[in-house]
Amino acid sequence: MELLRKFTLAAILGIALTLVAACGGGGDSDGSTSVGLPGVEAPAGEDSGSSDSCKFLSKEEVAEAIGPHDGGRQDYTFGGCVWTASSAKDGINEAIFATVLPKAQYESVAEIGEPVSGFVDGATYDETHGELWFPCRGGDYCGIKVGTASPDGRQETALRLGKILQGRV
């Protein structure tokens, strides 16, 4: 039942955000539709996507995990940014997701896994979905999702990218 509630809330949020974007809401006067996150700064000289959340990770950091990719775009399901590999690997479109969410939103979308030792207190990793979640700035939660064709190295990649994200928020 809890899983159904999560999917329902995610679907409602996705539909609402799609309608806002389709109706032209939230755009700046220059036509952009990026959603800014206060306190997040891009790596020096880096512009890795169409929204501020795509500045969580550099193009090179993402390429190290999934190879050549699309540069990142706003992700309305998971929140934050998603970088998708330029070509499928073994029929799978590999992707990296990074986000910072308020606690209530985190609780509605996160796949909360097992505790992770040697990282931030309260960090969890879900092996099935490749999701790392940890508390960060002012009660928010940071999330990294590693969607790769092979599960080998997913957790290590999530932890490496999580440490980078932690240092930027």
Image (cartoon, rainbow, N blue to C red):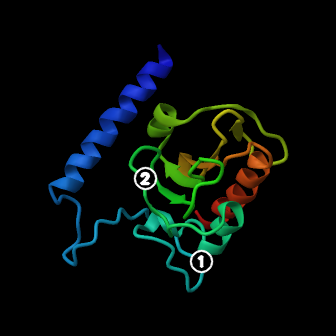
Marks 1 and 2, the one that precedes in the sequence: 1
Marker disc for residue 75: 2
Q: Quadrant of residue 122?
A: top right
Residue marked by disc 1 = 43
* Mark 1–mark 2 distance (CA, rounded to whole Å): 20 Å
- Residue 20 in the image, given as x and y percentages of width and height: 21, 51
Q: Residues within 10 Å of mark 2 (few under 14, many from 20)?
A: some
Asked whether 91 or 57 is in front, the reply is 91
Asked whether 58 or 40 is in front, the reply is 58
Q: Is residue 137 visible?
A: no
Q: Amino acid at mark 1?
A: Pro
Query: Is 41 rendered above or below residue 107?
Result: below
Return the residue found at the far top.
1
Q: Residues within 10 Å of mark 1 (few under 14, many from 20)?
A: few
Q: Residue at x 59, y 47 (%)?
A: 92
Q: Quadrant of the C terminus?
A: bottom right
